Image (tube, rainbow, N blue to C red):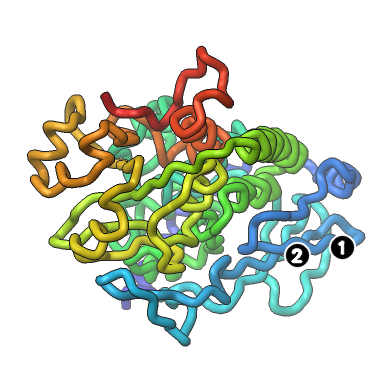
Amino acid sequence: MKKIILTLLSTALLLGTTACRHSADKGAEGKADVAAIMDSAARIAPVYAQGFKVKYLDNGVRLVEIADPQKHVKRHHKKDGTPTENKKGTIKSNYMADNYRFALVPRGVKAEVPAGYTRVEVPIRRTIVMTAIQLSNFTALHSLDVVKGITGTKNLFNKEILEGVKRGGIVKIGMEGNCDPELIMAAQPDVIFISPFKRGGYDVLKETGITLIPHLGSKELHPLGQAEWLKLVGMFVGKEKEANSRFKAIEERYNNLKEQVKATTNRPTIFSGEMHGGNWSAIGSQNFLAQIFRDAGANYVISDHNTGTIQMEFEALYAAAAHADYWRILNSYPGKFSYEALKSAEPRYALFDAFKKKGVIYCNMKYTPYYESSPVEPDALLADLVFIFHPEVMPRDYRPKYYHLMK
């Protein structure tokens, strides 16, 4: 019955809006420039990203395959921090299969789609995004005009999106697992970008019949791999050259700074996270953030080989991090965060050398659009950390964007 009601709703909405939509989009629906798509400068070829692959056909159609970037990574889960192999490998979600295949067909071009591929006409005209990391890709490519739906505006900084919501051009569909089907259909998206490893379900989204595109940038283990997903979005919005150019600049800045740090002789130690629910929420040693620590010239004290967030007992974390030089914290704190506030939250925090010697590296998401922009700025994250670990490498007038050493 639910599907029938949703189908009727979809039909009514589409019938009521088709005429005006076609009129509004008519100027943007011209036949795509296949030659431009096939141009070498527009060719999308991921180098660091492990979650998507692209194959070009002679007619401008691109066959895109999306899979879990951590598909073959073994996981380790013990609260005391000691490794234990999980032979099952990747954690499955309620949507993610082994892989998903899409045939991106230039808009206005007649082309057959190979069996096993879902047809998507590009560039898309309207979409819904479910996460901040997805939104960061559209922002970086100056393509927020196609974003017509988001999950919500809590902790959102982007003025263009906030204004769009205020004016009604962008709808808030609700969080994953609790989306409003009427609002989804009202947004009239060509596709919806999802993060299938979220805890919420996507049953409502699937029932709309709208093509769902998994965006797995957050699962990449290399910082540049996470940023490289803007190339995938570039294909959907018709800005392949811009995506390649933007990423090349990110890559060059990141790798150049990484090379400069290699010449330094000292390597400070660092740990990350805070206590939540009785356990320490730390990051695994294969997490992209741990990689940034290493690229910035520091040694991460956790060596569990996990890729995501791990829960550790305080005693286990303290044994590994008691004498670490630095402690990285990312949270949302109302007001000015301080060592006093940190100690008030958990008196044992004062036992760490990083606390005693004022080595806390901090970013407050209440006032910094961390998740809205840092996914496509790993070079900025790296620069902030290098400025703290090896200030002699950076310009004296460097101003950190995300992380600062808390005084």
Which residue type does callout 1 highlight? Leu
* Sequence-first disc among 1 and 2: 1
Q: Is residue 352 left or right of residue 367?
A: left
Say if mark 1 contacts mark 2, CB within 8 Å.
yes
The quarter of the image holding the C terminus is top left
Q: Element type at marker 1?
A: loop
| Residue nearer the viewer, 241 or 356 | 356
Q: Which residue is label 2 attached to?
A: 63
Q: Residue at x 39, y 55 (%)?
A: 301
Q: Residue at x 42, y 64 (%)?
A: 303
Q: Characterize the local packing of mark 2: few (<14), some (14-19) or many (20 or more) Cα atoms within 10 angstroms.
A: many
Q: Which label was assigned to residue 57?
A: 1
Q: In the figure, 146 relative to 151: above or below?
A: above
Q: Element type at marker 2?
A: strand
Residue pushed farthest front?
Answer: 265
Residue 128 at x, y percent in the picture: 47, 49
Residue pushed farthest top?
Answer: 397
Residue 68 at x, y percent in the picture: 55, 69
Residue 80 seen from this side = yes
Number of on-image labels: 2
| Residue nearer the viewer, 307 or 9 | 307
Quadrant in which residue 110 is drawn: bottom right
Q: Residue at x 85, y 55 (%)?
A: 60
Which residue type does callout 2 highlight? Leu
Q: Is residue 195 left or right of residue 337?
A: right
Residue 145 seen from this side = no
The quarter of the image holding the N terminus is bottom left
Q: CA distance from mark 1 to mark 2?
A: 8 Å
Residue 84 at x, y percent in the picture: 39, 80
